[in-house]
Image: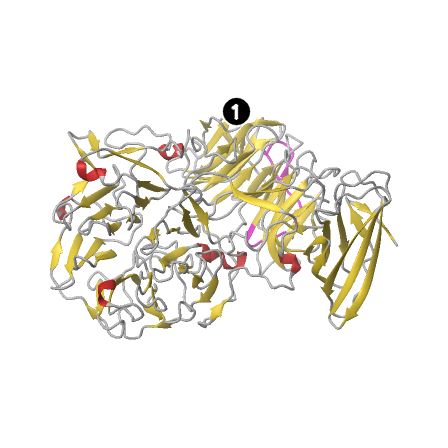
């Protein structure tokens, strides 16, 4: 799949090989990193949407299965629920590249142990080095060892493998194949430390495109797989024979017979191709190899399948089709551990008319196909595709024969037969995991059913989000699969956007006062790249486009739905009413555009630090505020129901970076204090009793990265995610729900659309939503103090005439004190802002009654008492 690239801040990773901390782990003395409120996080269901290049079955424990994705982390199969559980949601913002997984290994000696080789790009798109993550609890928690080089989970060749392997007899020994000339690496202490295998001297020389100056296609593929011959070892002793695949068309396979001390090129091997996979049937003594002329995962014009006899050294070409008849490479490769001699291989790059899967039950002497022609273009399939659980996999297409929909697959580099069940097979594609539980019917000529086995595995790059005040609660813009209209967040939509079906939707908007009117723009070879809907995104009509358009850019619709402004890639900003477009003036090409949510004639634009506005429907723009972020990503939105009210987030770590607010249509912006960095901004339903919409942002506040919410127009913020829910990079888009207080939709770059709900009924600084100003009193007392630390007791009194059902007391620390352990309340701290929320038992407070809580904290310099306390946005009196 194509992936949206995000250029983020450089990472302060060491080049040493000492064990690191778990990704995203916060220290106990950092209460700002804990959840601000009790949020429940889930995925908006799409089921799939991205490339799955690796599936790993543990060969010692039934139903222990893992999948790796190129940008969306690692998943573990839940047999009872027939779904996948994500395992890398704890990856934090600074280590976003660790959501790309290039290698995966499940320990057969100790099945609780799991290893992942992570890193997204080997060029400068990912500023951080790769790492090996290790888990002793099947991925529930991780420890990390940073590597002195990069890894490429989203680079060419990512479907080859597995590059990471555990010795099946001595599980403290692991091998890792590295790219970029870095060679073969080994750990002898269960992945804690790593060192280069200096006796392995061929690091690989294959480059997809040596002329690529970006470093993406010109990177050397390196060491691409490691396979142990378990028949050559005994428990507790290192396995004697190891095979390694190298990205070198003339020297693709090496072997060690002395547990990795020395290595030799396997004699007599075929040349001219890359060995994508090397899978050993130890019982029959056959090493099977799937070859392609390129690294994949998109391309491959020729390929072969070979079998190597480990005892005699005999090589045999067992390719399912003659070389002259191939138009694809081979990659997916698996053997049936229950039925030695049964082997399967995929033609991963056979895009048209479909991928092909081949099966042999006699060690490759003869093969049968998943489908074949009866009389061209008519096909006879051994299988039936049932995508009723994920209906969008048809793409809404009606192709002409010999193509079919849904396709059997594409980019099918992960192909695995369950080692405990000959009837179960899973294989990855560019958008899903397919599988069957009737595989042996293949051999009897009986039709078997293939279904998606992808529930819970959400892998989409989210580019924009909208939550209208009526109609569907969520409309999304996604990379590679376009986007969806979700009428039910817990159900898979029947179809992605069609008519037209963009390869990626880059921007969308709805008319604030007429939300049935929706517009989207995106990428599509040959166009059209803009589309309109009059029924809240249920149906679409392709629009015209001005000359010169090369991509979707950004698009906006007026508050009343009568006019559009489009800033496409390749040409300047244009305005129109849904037909022909007229070039706008006064605004540079490539500007980001949005509409005012009240005034139908007002549109806004932003580029390179300057804000622009139009009051004539986008015909002419004038420059307004300057001095805004001129470097890095910047996004802005206008507040519903408030003319000229605008929030802008963005910047770069080495330049201007933060959050700004304007209430005069962009003539002037005020930087929001306390927000160190911000990348997105969105609005949701106001807290009960509040007049201003809830604000949401992916930001760094008080030195802590997270998802934050404010219910008082940005005066105070609370972090609403926690360290277990970080999802790497979340800087694409964010929006609250205008109908459900507290609900927020968060974009990720590979983990799909995340949404959070809270059980709260009040605002971030308050308790009972109806508490009036002056209806509370606070007594704050430091009861004990020592060097660097203190203890305090707080009594909160309800001075109103109405009982409270819950409370949340807020204050600011004037000297930067930090709250530690708290009893009888739950603390949250973001920077100097603290909120203490009632425990379950002391939330109700009758009129005239009090609730008390206490805590320990830390201080440096001084420890003054807070000057003011707020409850529900109101100021309490201080005793």
The answer to whether residue 503 is left or right of residue 776 is: left
Which SS does the magenta portion mostly show?
Answer: loop
Give residue 786's position: percent from left, percent from top: 77, 71
Q: Which residues are magenta?
A: 613-633
Which residue is at the front of the view, 649 or 435?
435
Q: Which residue is mark 1?
A: 535
Give residue 785's position: percent from left, percent from top: 78, 69
Which residue is at the front of the view, 101 or 537?
101
In this rendering, the answer to whether 32 lies above or below 404 is: below
Secondary element at image label 1: loop
Q: Residue at x 82, y 57 (%)?
A: 780
Give residue 18's position: percent from left, percent from top: 46, 72
From the image, which quarter does the C terminus lie in? bottom right
Name which quarter of the figure residue 315 lies in. bottom left
Residue 487 is a magenta residue: no
The answer to whether residue 337 is left or right of residue 778 is: left
Which residue is at the front of the view, 223 or 659?
223
Q: Residues within 10 Å of mark 1 (few under 14, many from 20)?
A: few
Name which quarter of the figure residue 497 lies in. top left
């Amino acid at each position: 799949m194509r992936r949206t690239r995000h250029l983020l801040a450089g990472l302060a990773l060491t080049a040493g090989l000492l064990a690191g901390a778990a990704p995203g782990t916060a220290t106990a003395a950092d209460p700002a990193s804990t959840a601000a409120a009790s949020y429940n996080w889930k995925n908006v269901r799409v089921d799939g949407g991205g490339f799955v290049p690796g599936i790993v079955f543990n060969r010692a424990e039934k139903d222990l299965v893992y999948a790796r994705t190129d940008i969306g982390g690692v998943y573990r199969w839940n047999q009872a629920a027939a779904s996948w559980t994500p395992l890398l949601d704890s990856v934090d913002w600074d280590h976003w590249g660790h959501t790309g997984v290039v290698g995966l290994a499940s320990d057969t000696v100790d099945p609780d142990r799991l290893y992942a080789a992570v890193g997204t790009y080997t060029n400068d798109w990912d500023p951080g080095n790769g790492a090996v993550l290790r888990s002793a609890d099947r991925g529930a928690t991780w420890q990390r060892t940073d590597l002195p080089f990069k890894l490429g989970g989203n680079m060419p060749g990512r479907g080859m493998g597995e590059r990471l392997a555990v010795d099946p007899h001595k599980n403290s020994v692991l091998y890792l194949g590295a790219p970029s000339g870095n060679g073969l690496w080994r750990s002898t202490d269960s992945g804690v430390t790593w060192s280069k295998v200096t006796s392995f001297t061929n690091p690989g020389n294959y480059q997809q495109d040596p002329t690529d100056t970006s470093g993406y296609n010109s990177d050397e593929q390196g060491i691409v797989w490691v396979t142990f011959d378990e028949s050559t070892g005994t428990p507790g002793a290192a396995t004697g024979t190891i095979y390694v695949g190298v990205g070198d068309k003339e020297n693709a396979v090496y072997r060690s017979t002395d547990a990795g001390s020395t290595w030799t090129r396997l004699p007599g091997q075929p040349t001219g191709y890359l060995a994508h996979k090397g899978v050993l049937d130890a019982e029959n003594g056959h090493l099977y190899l799937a070859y392609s002329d390129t690294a994949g995962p998109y391309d491959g014009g020729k390929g072969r399948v070979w079998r190597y006899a480990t005892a005699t050294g005999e090589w045999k070409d067992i390719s399912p089709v003659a070389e002259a008849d191939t138009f694809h490479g081979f990659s997916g490769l698996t053997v049936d551990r229950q039925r030695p001699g049964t082997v399967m291989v995929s033609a991963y790059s056979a895009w048209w008319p479909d991928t092909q899967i081949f099966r042999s039950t006699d060690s490759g002497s003869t093969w049968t196909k998943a489908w074949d022609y009866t009389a061209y273009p008519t096909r006879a399939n051994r299988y039936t595709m049932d995508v009723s659980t994920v209906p969008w996999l048809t793409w809404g297409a009606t192709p002409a024969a010999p193509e079919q929909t849904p396709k059997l697959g594409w980019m099918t580099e992960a192909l695995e037969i369950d080692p405990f069940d000959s009837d179960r097979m899973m294989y990855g594609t560019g958008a899903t995991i397919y599988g069957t539980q009737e595989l042996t019917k293949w051999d009897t000529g009986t039709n078997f059913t293939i279904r998606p086995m992808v529930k819970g595995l959400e892998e989409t790059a989210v580019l924009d989000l909208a939550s209208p005040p009526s109609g569907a609660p969520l409309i999304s813009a996604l990379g590679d699969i376009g986007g969806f209209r979700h009428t039910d967040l817990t159900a898979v939509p029947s179809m992605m956007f069609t008519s037209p079906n963009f390869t990626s939707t880059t921007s969308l908007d709805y008319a604030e006062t007429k939300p049935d009117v929706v517009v989207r723009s995106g990428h599509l070879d040959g166009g059209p790249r803009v589309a309109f809907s009059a029924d809240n995104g249920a149906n679409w009509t392709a629009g015209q486009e001005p000359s010169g358009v090369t991509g979707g850019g950004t698009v906006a619709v007026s508050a009343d739905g009568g006019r559009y402004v489009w800033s496409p890639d390749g040409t300047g900003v244009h305005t129109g009413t849904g037909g022909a477009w007229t070039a706008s003036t006064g605004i540079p090409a490539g500007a980001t555009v949005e509409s005012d949510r009240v005034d139908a004639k007002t549109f806004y634009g932003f580029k390179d630090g300057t804000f622009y506005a139009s009051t004539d429907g986008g015909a002419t723009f004038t420059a307004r505020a300057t001095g805004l972020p001129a470097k890095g990503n910047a996004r802005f939105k206008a507040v519903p129901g408030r003319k000229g009210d605008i929030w802008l987030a963005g910047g770069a770590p080495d330049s201007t970076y933060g959050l700004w607010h304007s209430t005069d249509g962009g003539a002037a912006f005020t930087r929001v204090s306390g927000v160190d960095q911000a990348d997105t901004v969105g609005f949701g339903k106001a807290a009960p009793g509040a007049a201003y919409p809830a604000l949401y942002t992916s930001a760094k506040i008080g030195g802590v990265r997270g998802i934050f919410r404010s219910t008082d127009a940005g005066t105070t913020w609370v972090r609403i995610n926690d360290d277990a829910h970080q999802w790497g990079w979340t800087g694409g888009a964010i929006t609250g729900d205008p109908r459900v207080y507290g609900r927020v939709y968060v974009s990720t770059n590979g983990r799909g659309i995340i949404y959070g709900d809270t059980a709260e009924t009040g605002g971030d600084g308050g308790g009972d939503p109806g508490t009036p100003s002056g209806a509370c009193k606070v007594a704050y007392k430091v009861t004990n103090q020592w060097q660097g630390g203190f203890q305090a007791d707080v009594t909160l009194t309800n001075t109103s005439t109405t009982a409270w059902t819950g409370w949340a007391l807020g204050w600011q620390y004037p000297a930067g004190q930090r709250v530690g352990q708290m009893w009888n309340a739950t603390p949250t701290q973001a920077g100097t802002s603290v909120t203490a929320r009632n425990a379950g038992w002391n939330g109700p407070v009758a009129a005239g009654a009090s609730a008390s809580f206490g805590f320990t904290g830390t201080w440096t310099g001084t420890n003054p008492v807070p000057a003011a306390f707020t409850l529900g946005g109101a100021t309490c009196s201080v005793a």
